[in-house]
Image (tube, rainbow, N blue to C red):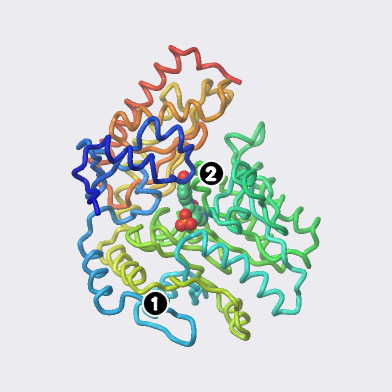
Amino acid sequence: MRQISNHLPTAELQALDAAHHMHPFTANEGLAKKGARIITRARGVTLTDSEGNEILDGMAGLWCVNIGYGRKELAQVAARQMEELPFYNTFFQTSHVPAIALAARLAELAPHDLNHVFFAGSGSEANDTNIRMVRHYWAMKGKPDKKVIISRKNAYHGSSMGSASLGGMAGMHAQGGMPIPDIVHIDQPHWYSEGGDMTPEEFGLERARQLEAMIEKLGEDNVAAFIAEPIQGAGGVIVPPDSYWPEVQRICDRYEILLIADEVITGFGRTGNWFGSQTYGIRPHIMTVAKGLSSGYAPIGGSIVCDEVAEVIAKDEFNHGYTYSGHPVAAAVALENLRIIEEEGVIDHVRDVAHPHLAERWHALADHPLVGETKLVGLMGSLALTPDKASRAKFAAEPGTAGYIVRERCFANNVVMRHVMDRMVIAPPLVIKPAEIDLLIERATKALDEAHAELKAEGMLKAA
Ligand code: PXG
Protein backbone atom coordinates (compact mmCIF):
# COMPACT_ATOMS: atom_id res chain seq x y z
CA MET A 1 0.00 0.00 0.00
CA ARG A 2 1.28 3.43 -0.94
CA GLN A 3 1.74 5.89 1.93
CA ILE A 4 0.00 9.23 1.52
CA SER A 5 1.68 11.77 3.78
CA ASN A 6 2.21 15.48 4.40
CA HIS A 7 5.42 15.22 2.43
CA LEU A 8 3.84 14.58 -0.96
CA PRO A 9 3.84 17.60 -3.27
CA THR A 10 0.70 19.74 -2.97
CA ALA A 11 -0.35 19.07 -6.56
CA GLU A 12 -0.26 15.33 -6.01
CA LEU A 13 -2.33 15.58 -2.82
CA GLN A 14 -4.80 17.84 -4.63
CA ALA A 15 -5.13 15.38 -7.50
CA LEU A 16 -5.86 12.49 -5.12
CA ASP A 17 -8.29 14.69 -3.21
CA ALA A 18 -10.09 15.62 -6.42
CA ALA A 19 -10.22 12.00 -7.57
CA HIS A 20 -11.61 10.46 -4.40
CA HIS A 21 -12.76 12.91 -1.76
CA MET A 22 -16.28 14.37 -1.90
CA HIS A 23 -16.24 17.63 0.09
CA PRO A 24 -19.24 18.86 2.09
CA PHE A 25 -21.18 21.91 0.82
CA THR A 26 -18.95 22.06 -2.25
CA ALA A 27 -19.33 21.93 -6.02
CA ASN A 28 -16.66 19.28 -6.29
CA GLU A 29 -16.14 19.66 -10.04
CA GLY A 30 -15.15 23.30 -9.62
CA LEU A 31 -12.94 22.53 -6.65
CA ALA A 32 -11.19 19.74 -8.56
CA LYS A 33 -10.10 22.24 -11.21
CA LYS A 34 -8.79 24.66 -8.64
CA GLY A 35 -7.34 22.23 -6.09
CA ALA A 36 -8.17 22.25 -2.39
CA ARG A 37 -6.04 24.13 0.11
CA ILE A 38 -4.36 21.46 2.21
CA ILE A 39 -3.84 22.14 5.89
CA THR A 40 -1.05 20.10 7.38
CA ARG A 41 -0.64 21.27 10.98
CA ALA A 42 -1.70 23.92 13.46
CA ARG A 43 -0.63 25.52 16.75
CA GLY A 44 -2.50 28.02 18.86
CA VAL A 45 -4.48 30.14 16.40
CA THR A 46 -2.27 29.46 13.40
CA LEU A 47 -2.69 26.94 10.58
CA THR A 48 0.09 25.80 8.29
CA ASP A 49 -0.72 24.66 4.75
CA SER A 50 1.16 22.28 2.47
CA GLU A 51 2.98 25.22 0.88
CA GLY A 52 4.25 26.39 4.26
CA ASN A 53 1.93 29.40 4.50
CA GLU A 54 1.00 30.38 8.04
CA ILE A 55 -2.64 31.34 8.21
CA LEU A 56 -4.41 33.00 11.14
CA ASP A 57 -7.56 31.00 11.79
CA GLY A 58 -10.30 33.53 12.41
CA MET A 59 -12.91 30.72 12.38
CA ALA A 60 -11.54 28.30 15.03
CA GLY A 61 -11.69 25.52 12.43
CA LEU A 62 -15.46 25.47 11.97
CA TRP A 63 -16.47 27.48 15.06
CA CYS A 64 -15.12 24.75 17.30
CA VAL A 65 -11.43 24.89 18.28
CA ASN A 66 -12.17 27.02 21.35
CA ILE A 67 -8.94 26.27 23.26
CA GLY A 68 -6.75 26.58 20.16
CA TYR A 69 -4.70 23.97 18.32
CA GLY A 70 -1.93 21.73 19.54
CA ARG A 71 -2.87 21.07 23.16
CA LYS A 72 -0.88 17.97 24.07
CA GLU A 73 -3.02 17.27 27.15
CA LEU A 74 -5.92 16.29 24.90
CA ALA A 75 -3.73 14.01 22.80
CA GLN A 76 -2.41 12.33 25.93
CA VAL A 77 -5.86 11.82 27.42
CA ALA A 78 -7.04 10.32 24.12
CA ALA A 79 -4.07 7.95 23.96
CA ARG A 80 -4.56 6.86 27.57
CA GLN A 81 -8.29 6.27 27.05
CA MET A 82 -7.65 4.30 23.85
CA GLU A 83 -5.33 2.02 25.75
CA GLU A 84 -7.66 1.57 28.68
CA LEU A 85 -11.04 1.32 26.96
CA PRO A 86 -11.21 2.49 23.33
CA PHE A 87 -14.88 1.71 22.99
CA TYR A 88 -17.81 0.37 24.80
CA ASN A 89 -21.47 1.10 24.24
CA THR A 90 -23.91 2.68 26.65
CA PHE A 91 -26.92 0.65 25.48
CA PHE A 92 -27.98 -2.61 27.24
CA GLN A 93 -27.69 -1.37 30.82
CA THR A 94 -23.95 -0.62 30.70
CA SER A 95 -21.97 2.55 31.25
CA HIS A 96 -18.35 3.67 31.49
CA VAL A 97 -16.38 6.26 33.41
CA PRO A 98 -15.81 8.90 30.70
CA ALA A 99 -19.51 9.10 29.81
CA ILE A 100 -20.52 9.19 33.48
CA ALA A 101 -17.97 11.87 34.33
CA LEU A 102 -18.78 14.04 31.32
CA ALA A 103 -22.55 13.87 31.91
CA ALA A 104 -22.04 14.84 35.55
CA ARG A 105 -19.72 17.70 34.58
CA LEU A 106 -22.15 19.05 31.99
CA ALA A 107 -24.96 18.91 34.55
CA GLU A 108 -22.78 21.05 36.82
CA LEU A 109 -21.94 23.58 34.12
CA ALA A 110 -25.35 23.90 32.49
CA PRO A 111 -27.71 26.44 34.04
CA HIS A 112 -30.95 25.78 35.95
CA ASP A 113 -32.13 22.19 36.09
CA LEU A 114 -30.45 21.03 32.88
CA ASN A 115 -29.09 17.94 34.61
CA HIS A 116 -29.28 15.07 32.12
CA VAL A 117 -27.29 14.37 28.97
CA PHE A 118 -28.11 12.27 25.92
CA PHE A 119 -24.88 11.91 23.95
CA ALA A 120 -24.46 11.99 20.17
CA GLY A 121 -21.56 12.13 17.75
CA SER A 122 -22.34 15.61 16.40
CA GLY A 123 -24.68 18.58 16.57
CA SER A 124 -26.81 17.18 13.75
CA GLU A 125 -27.32 13.92 15.58
CA ALA A 126 -28.11 15.74 18.81
CA ASN A 127 -30.79 17.79 17.08
CA ASP A 128 -32.28 14.62 15.59
CA THR A 129 -32.42 13.31 19.16
CA ASN A 130 -34.23 16.50 20.16
CA ILE A 131 -36.91 16.10 17.51
CA ARG A 132 -37.69 12.59 18.68
CA MET A 133 -37.34 13.43 22.37
CA VAL A 134 -39.72 16.40 22.45
CA ARG A 135 -42.37 14.57 20.42
CA HIS A 136 -42.01 11.46 22.55
CA TYR A 137 -42.19 13.60 25.71
CA TRP A 138 -45.58 15.01 24.74
CA ALA A 139 -46.83 11.58 23.64
CA MET A 140 -45.82 10.22 27.05
CA LYS A 141 -47.82 13.06 28.63
CA GLY A 142 -50.88 11.92 26.70
CA LYS A 143 -50.61 14.65 24.06
CA PRO A 144 -49.46 12.88 20.89
CA ASP A 145 -50.72 15.73 18.71
CA LYS A 146 -48.15 18.13 20.13
CA LYS A 147 -45.68 17.40 17.34
CA VAL A 148 -44.94 20.58 15.44
CA ILE A 149 -41.56 22.18 16.01
CA ILE A 150 -41.28 25.87 15.22
CA SER A 151 -37.91 27.02 13.94
CA ARG A 152 -36.66 30.02 11.97
CA LYS A 153 -35.67 30.84 8.42
CA ASN A 154 -31.90 31.04 7.97
CA ALA A 155 -31.33 28.92 11.07
CA TYR A 156 -28.68 26.20 10.94
CA HIS A 157 -29.22 23.08 13.02
CA GLY A 158 -27.27 20.46 11.06
CA SER A 159 -27.24 18.46 7.88
CA SER A 160 -29.08 15.20 8.59
CA MET A 161 -32.69 14.91 7.39
CA GLY A 162 -34.11 15.91 10.75
CA SER A 163 -31.68 18.63 11.69
CA ALA A 164 -31.60 20.15 8.19
CA SER A 165 -35.40 20.24 8.31
CA LEU A 166 -35.17 22.17 11.57
CA GLY A 167 -32.73 24.49 9.83
CA GLY A 168 -34.16 27.23 7.68
CA MET A 169 -31.73 27.09 4.76
CA ALA A 170 -33.75 27.16 1.54
CA GLY A 171 -30.82 25.81 -0.47
CA MET A 172 -30.65 22.74 1.75
CA HIS A 173 -34.41 22.14 1.70
CA ALA A 174 -34.30 22.21 -2.09
CA GLN A 175 -32.17 19.05 -2.18
CA GLY A 176 -33.44 15.70 -0.94
CA GLY A 177 -37.03 16.24 0.09
CA MET A 178 -37.05 18.47 3.14
CA PRO A 179 -38.39 19.65 5.48
CA ILE A 180 -39.81 16.49 7.02
CA PRO A 181 -43.42 16.89 8.23
CA ASP A 182 -44.46 19.02 11.20
CA ILE A 183 -41.64 21.52 11.14
CA VAL A 184 -42.47 25.15 10.36
CA HIS A 185 -40.32 28.26 10.10
CA ILE A 186 -40.94 31.84 11.20
CA ASP A 187 -38.84 34.86 10.17
CA GLN A 188 -35.44 35.55 11.70
CA PRO A 189 -34.57 38.60 13.84
CA HIS A 190 -32.18 39.99 11.19
CA TRP A 191 -32.70 43.74 11.54
CA TYR A 192 -29.96 44.88 9.14
CA SER A 193 -31.40 43.01 6.17
CA GLU A 194 -35.08 42.80 7.00
CA GLY A 195 -35.80 45.55 9.55
CA GLY A 196 -36.86 48.21 7.03
CA ASP A 197 -37.82 51.44 8.79
CA MET A 198 -38.41 49.86 12.20
CA THR A 199 -36.01 50.49 15.05
CA PRO A 200 -34.10 47.35 16.03
CA GLU A 201 -36.12 47.15 19.26
CA GLU A 202 -39.49 47.36 17.48
CA PHE A 203 -38.31 44.84 14.93
CA GLY A 204 -37.07 42.41 17.62
CA LEU A 205 -40.51 42.45 19.25
CA GLU A 206 -42.25 42.01 15.90
CA ARG A 207 -40.13 38.95 15.04
CA ALA A 208 -40.54 37.43 18.52
CA ARG A 209 -44.31 37.87 18.29
CA GLN A 210 -44.33 35.80 15.10
CA LEU A 211 -43.71 32.89 17.45
CA GLU A 212 -46.85 33.72 19.39
CA ALA A 213 -48.84 34.17 16.18
CA MET A 214 -47.61 30.79 14.88
CA ILE A 215 -48.53 29.02 18.14
CA GLU A 216 -52.00 30.60 17.96
CA LYS A 217 -52.39 29.66 14.32
CA LEU A 218 -51.36 26.03 14.79
CA GLY A 219 -53.05 25.68 18.18
CA GLU A 220 -51.02 25.25 21.34
CA ASP A 221 -52.15 21.61 21.49
CA ASN A 222 -50.25 20.89 18.27
CA VAL A 223 -46.94 22.56 19.08
CA ALA A 224 -44.13 20.60 20.76
CA ALA A 225 -41.26 23.06 20.83
CA PHE A 226 -39.48 26.13 19.54
CA ILE A 227 -35.80 25.73 18.58
CA ALA A 228 -33.34 28.55 18.04
CA GLU A 229 -29.68 29.43 18.22
CA PRO A 230 -29.15 32.22 20.81
CA ILE A 231 -27.17 33.92 18.02
CA GLN A 232 -27.50 32.48 14.51
CA GLY A 233 -24.00 31.35 13.53
CA ALA A 234 -23.89 29.80 10.07
CA GLY A 235 -26.70 32.17 9.08
CA GLY A 236 -24.18 35.02 9.31
CA VAL A 237 -23.73 35.78 13.04
CA ILE A 238 -27.10 37.46 13.23
CA VAL A 239 -27.21 39.11 16.66
CA PRO A 240 -30.87 39.61 17.62
CA PRO A 241 -32.04 43.02 18.89
CA ASP A 242 -32.07 43.23 22.71
CA SER A 243 -35.86 43.10 22.74
CA TYR A 244 -36.01 39.70 21.02
CA TRP A 245 -35.08 37.03 23.56
CA PRO A 246 -37.01 38.44 26.56
CA GLU A 247 -40.14 38.48 24.41
CA VAL A 248 -39.51 34.93 23.13
CA GLN A 249 -39.01 33.79 26.72
CA ARG A 250 -42.27 35.46 27.77
CA ILE A 251 -44.09 33.61 24.98
CA CYS A 252 -42.47 30.27 25.84
CA ASP A 253 -43.48 30.78 29.49
CA ARG A 254 -47.05 31.62 28.54
CA TYR A 255 -47.69 28.61 26.32
CA GLU A 256 -47.10 24.99 27.12
CA ILE A 257 -44.24 24.39 24.69
CA LEU A 258 -40.61 23.39 25.12
CA LEU A 259 -37.72 25.70 24.31
CA ILE A 260 -34.63 24.18 22.71
CA ALA A 261 -31.53 26.40 22.62
CA ASP A 262 -29.10 25.20 19.98
CA GLU A 263 -25.78 26.04 21.65
CA VAL A 264 -23.57 24.14 19.20
CA ILE A 265 -21.71 27.37 18.37
CA THR A 266 -22.65 29.58 21.33
CA GLY A 267 -21.70 27.01 23.98
CA PHE A 268 -18.46 26.70 25.94
CA GLY A 269 -17.39 30.31 26.18
CA ARG A 270 -18.04 31.69 22.71
CA THR A 271 -20.32 34.50 23.93
CA GLY A 272 -18.36 35.27 27.10
CA ASN A 273 -20.32 32.88 29.33
CA TRP A 274 -20.37 29.10 29.44
CA PHE A 275 -23.57 29.20 27.37
CA GLY A 276 -25.29 31.73 25.13
CA SER A 277 -28.48 31.07 27.10
CA GLN A 278 -26.79 32.73 30.09
CA THR A 279 -25.71 35.70 27.96
CA TYR A 280 -29.35 36.22 26.90
CA GLY A 281 -31.12 35.14 30.11
CA ILE A 282 -32.89 32.26 28.34
CA ARG A 283 -34.27 29.25 30.24
CA PRO A 284 -34.28 26.37 27.75
CA HIS A 285 -35.66 22.89 28.48
CA ILE A 286 -33.00 21.36 26.23
CA MET A 287 -29.64 22.64 25.01
CA THR A 288 -27.92 21.17 21.95
CA VAL A 289 -24.14 21.03 22.32
CA ALA A 290 -21.22 19.86 20.14
CA LYS A 291 -18.19 21.65 18.60
CA GLY A 292 -16.61 23.54 21.57
CA LEU A 293 -17.55 20.66 23.90
CA SER A 294 -14.33 18.97 22.77
CA SER A 295 -12.84 22.02 21.02
CA GLY A 296 -13.19 19.87 17.91
CA TYR A 297 -10.44 17.48 19.03
CA ALA A 298 -12.92 14.57 18.92
CA PRO A 299 -16.40 14.33 17.40
CA ILE A 300 -19.00 14.54 20.15
CA GLY A 301 -22.32 16.25 20.74
CA GLY A 302 -25.33 15.91 22.96
CA SER A 303 -28.61 17.17 24.32
CA ILE A 304 -28.58 18.57 27.86
CA VAL A 305 -32.09 18.01 29.16
CA CYS A 306 -34.05 19.48 32.10
CA ASP A 307 -35.34 17.38 35.00
CA GLU A 308 -38.99 17.39 33.92
CA VAL A 309 -38.37 16.19 30.35
CA ALA A 310 -35.76 13.62 31.44
CA GLU A 311 -38.06 12.25 34.15
CA VAL A 312 -40.97 11.78 31.75
CA ILE A 313 -38.76 10.19 29.07
CA ALA A 314 -37.24 7.87 31.71
CA LYS A 315 -40.55 6.15 32.36
CA ASP A 316 -40.45 4.15 29.15
CA GLU A 317 -37.87 2.82 26.72
CA PHE A 318 -36.77 5.67 24.39
CA ASN A 319 -36.03 3.79 21.18
CA HIS A 320 -33.15 5.97 20.10
CA GLY A 321 -29.35 5.98 20.32
CA TYR A 322 -26.11 6.02 18.37
CA THR A 323 -23.24 3.54 18.44
CA TYR A 324 -21.00 6.39 19.48
CA SER A 325 -23.33 7.94 22.09
CA GLY A 326 -20.90 8.84 24.88
CA HIS A 327 -17.87 7.43 23.03
CA PRO A 328 -15.22 6.97 25.75
CA VAL A 329 -12.32 8.56 23.87
CA ALA A 330 -14.41 11.56 22.75
CA ALA A 331 -15.89 11.93 26.24
CA ALA A 332 -12.45 11.82 27.88
CA VAL A 333 -11.16 14.42 25.44
CA ALA A 334 -14.20 16.64 26.11
CA LEU A 335 -13.64 16.40 29.87
CA GLU A 336 -10.02 17.44 29.49
CA ASN A 337 -11.09 20.33 27.26
CA LEU A 338 -13.60 21.50 29.89
CA ARG A 339 -10.89 21.25 32.55
CA ILE A 340 -8.62 23.50 30.48
CA ILE A 341 -11.40 26.02 29.82
CA GLU A 342 -12.13 26.24 33.53
CA GLU A 343 -8.65 26.02 35.05
CA GLU A 344 -7.03 28.38 32.58
CA GLY A 345 -9.82 30.93 32.88
CA VAL A 346 -10.52 30.85 29.16
CA ILE A 347 -13.97 32.42 29.55
CA ASP A 348 -12.60 35.21 31.77
CA HIS A 349 -10.02 35.81 29.04
CA VAL A 350 -12.82 36.16 26.48
CA ARG A 351 -14.78 38.54 28.68
CA ASP A 352 -11.99 40.64 30.14
CA VAL A 353 -9.26 40.64 27.48
CA ALA A 354 -10.08 39.28 24.04
CA HIS A 355 -13.61 40.63 23.60
CA PRO A 356 -12.84 44.22 24.70
CA HIS A 357 -9.74 44.33 22.49
CA LEU A 358 -11.42 42.80 19.47
CA ALA A 359 -14.53 44.94 19.97
CA GLU A 360 -12.52 48.14 19.72
CA ARG A 361 -10.78 47.00 16.53
CA TRP A 362 -13.77 45.24 14.95
CA HIS A 363 -16.22 48.10 15.38
CA ALA A 364 -13.64 50.48 13.89
CA LEU A 365 -14.07 48.55 10.62
CA ALA A 366 -17.50 50.19 10.37
CA ASP A 367 -15.61 53.18 8.91
CA HIS A 368 -14.48 51.09 5.94
CA PRO A 369 -16.30 52.09 2.71
CA LEU A 370 -17.48 48.48 2.18
CA VAL A 371 -18.85 47.87 5.68
CA GLY A 372 -22.47 48.60 6.61
CA GLU A 373 -22.56 47.30 10.19
CA THR A 374 -20.36 45.41 12.64
CA LYS A 375 -21.56 43.02 15.34
CA LEU A 376 -19.63 41.22 18.06
CA VAL A 377 -20.77 39.19 21.05
CA GLY A 378 -17.96 37.56 22.99
CA LEU A 379 -15.80 36.21 20.20
CA MET A 380 -18.38 35.76 17.46
CA GLY A 381 -18.62 38.65 15.07
CA SER A 382 -19.92 39.69 11.71
CA LEU A 383 -19.86 42.58 9.33
CA ALA A 384 -22.26 43.43 6.55
CA LEU A 385 -20.81 44.32 3.16
CA THR A 386 -22.73 47.00 1.30
CA PRO A 387 -22.35 49.25 -1.74
CA ASP A 388 -24.20 52.01 0.17
CA LYS A 389 -23.90 52.37 3.94
CA ALA A 390 -26.71 54.88 4.43
CA SER A 391 -29.46 52.77 2.90
CA ARG A 392 -28.11 49.35 4.07
CA ALA A 393 -28.31 48.45 0.36
CA LYS A 394 -27.61 45.02 -1.09
CA PHE A 395 -25.33 44.63 -4.11
CA ALA A 396 -26.79 44.51 -7.61
CA ALA A 397 -24.57 41.49 -8.28
CA GLU A 398 -25.67 37.96 -7.40
CA PRO A 399 -25.89 37.74 -3.56
CA GLY A 400 -22.66 36.35 -2.13
CA THR A 401 -20.39 37.59 -4.92
CA ALA A 402 -18.88 40.40 -2.86
CA GLY A 403 -18.56 38.13 0.17
CA TYR A 404 -16.75 35.51 -1.90
CA ILE A 405 -14.30 38.13 -3.19
CA VAL A 406 -13.54 39.32 0.34
CA ARG A 407 -13.06 35.73 1.54
CA GLU A 408 -10.63 35.02 -1.30
CA ARG A 409 -8.68 38.18 -0.45
CA CYS A 410 -8.61 37.03 3.19
CA PHE A 411 -7.04 33.71 2.20
CA ALA A 412 -4.54 35.53 0.00
CA ASN A 413 -3.59 37.58 3.07
CA ASN A 414 -3.28 34.55 5.32
CA VAL A 415 -6.35 35.02 7.44
CA VAL A 416 -9.47 32.82 7.50
CA MET A 417 -12.76 34.72 7.61
CA ARG A 418 -15.89 33.02 6.34
CA HIS A 419 -18.54 34.69 4.20
CA VAL A 420 -22.24 34.03 4.47
CA MET A 421 -23.65 35.62 1.35
CA ASP A 422 -22.47 39.23 1.69
CA ARG A 423 -21.69 39.07 5.42
CA MET A 424 -18.25 38.25 6.77
CA VAL A 425 -18.07 36.27 9.99
CA ILE A 426 -15.35 35.53 12.53
CA ALA A 427 -15.15 33.18 15.50
CA PRO A 428 -11.47 32.82 16.40
CA PRO A 429 -10.15 30.42 19.04
CA LEU A 430 -11.10 31.79 22.46
CA VAL A 431 -7.46 31.85 23.55
CA ILE A 432 -6.51 34.44 20.90
CA LYS A 433 -4.09 37.05 22.29
CA PRO A 434 -4.34 40.83 21.73
CA ALA A 435 -1.34 40.85 19.36
CA GLU A 436 -2.98 38.09 17.30
CA ILE A 437 -6.21 40.09 17.23
CA ASP A 438 -4.22 43.03 15.86
CA LEU A 439 -2.80 40.78 13.15
CA LEU A 440 -6.26 39.46 12.31
CA ILE A 441 -7.60 43.00 11.94
CA GLU A 442 -4.57 44.13 9.93
CA ARG A 443 -5.01 41.27 7.45
CA ALA A 444 -8.79 41.61 7.34
CA THR A 445 -8.47 45.33 6.61
CA LYS A 446 -6.04 44.66 3.80
CA ALA A 447 -8.42 42.06 2.38
CA LEU A 448 -11.33 44.52 2.56
CA ASP A 449 -9.23 47.22 0.84
CA GLU A 450 -8.22 44.84 -1.96
CA ALA A 451 -11.77 43.57 -2.38
CA HIS A 452 -13.08 47.13 -2.45
CA ALA A 453 -10.61 48.02 -5.22
CA GLU A 454 -11.55 44.88 -7.16
CA LEU A 455 -15.29 45.50 -6.83
CA LYS A 456 -14.76 49.11 -7.93
CA ALA A 457 -12.64 48.11 -10.92
CA GLU A 458 -15.29 45.59 -12.01
CA GLY A 459 -18.07 48.15 -11.61
CA MET A 460 -19.67 46.05 -8.88
CA LEU A 461 -20.19 48.73 -6.25
CA LYS A 462 -23.76 49.17 -7.47
CA ALA A 463 -26.78 48.85 -5.21
CA ALA A 464 -29.57 46.45 -6.11
N1 PXG B 1 -26.35 23.47 15.28
C1 PXG B 1 -25.65 24.59 15.03
C2 PXG B 1 -26.08 25.88 15.65
C3 PXG B 1 -24.51 24.51 14.22
O1 PXG B 1 -23.82 25.62 13.95
C4 PXG B 1 -24.93 22.15 13.96
C5 PXG B 1 -26.03 22.28 14.78
C6 PXG B 1 -24.60 20.80 13.41
O2 PXG B 1 -23.48 20.28 14.02
P1 PXG B 1 -22.60 19.17 13.25
O3 PXG B 1 -21.62 18.78 14.33
O4 PXG B 1 -23.49 18.05 12.90
O5 PXG B 1 -22.01 19.82 12.06
C7 PXG B 1 -24.15 23.27 13.67
C8 PXG B 1 -22.96 23.12 12.76
C9 PXG B 1 -20.69 26.92 8.51
C10 PXG B 1 -20.94 25.61 9.17
O6 PXG B 1 -20.42 26.91 7.31
C11 PXG B 1 -21.54 25.56 10.40
C12 PXG B 1 -21.80 24.34 10.99
C13 PXG B 1 -21.42 23.18 10.34
C14 PXG B 1 -20.81 23.24 9.10
C15 PXG B 1 -20.57 24.46 8.50
O7 PXG B 1 -20.76 27.96 9.15
N2 PXG B 1 -22.46 24.31 12.19
In the picture, measured across the screen, residue 352 lies left or right of residue 207, that is left
Could you tell me the amino acid type at mark 2?
Answer: Gly
Label ID, residue 415:
none
Q: What secondary structure is found at the residue carrying circle 2?
A: loop
Viewer-nearest residue: 286 or 40: 40
Q: Is residue 157 above or below residue 464?
A: below
Q: What is the quadrant of residue 83 in the picture? A: bottom left
The residue wearing badge 2 is 235
**Along the line of sight, which residue is nearer the eye, 63 or 210?**
63
Q: Give the image location of residue 228, x and y in percent.
A: 58, 55
Q: Position of residue 61 (x, y in %)?
A: 35, 48
Instruction: Name the residue type under label 1.
Output: Ala
Picture mark count: 2
Q: According to the image, label 1 marks what residue?
A: 99
* Badge 1: residue crowd in 10 Å (few <14, some 14–19, many ≥20): many
Residue 33 figure quarter:
top left
Q: Earlier in the sequence, mark 1 or mark 2?
A: 1
Q: Is residue 96 above or below residue 271?
A: below
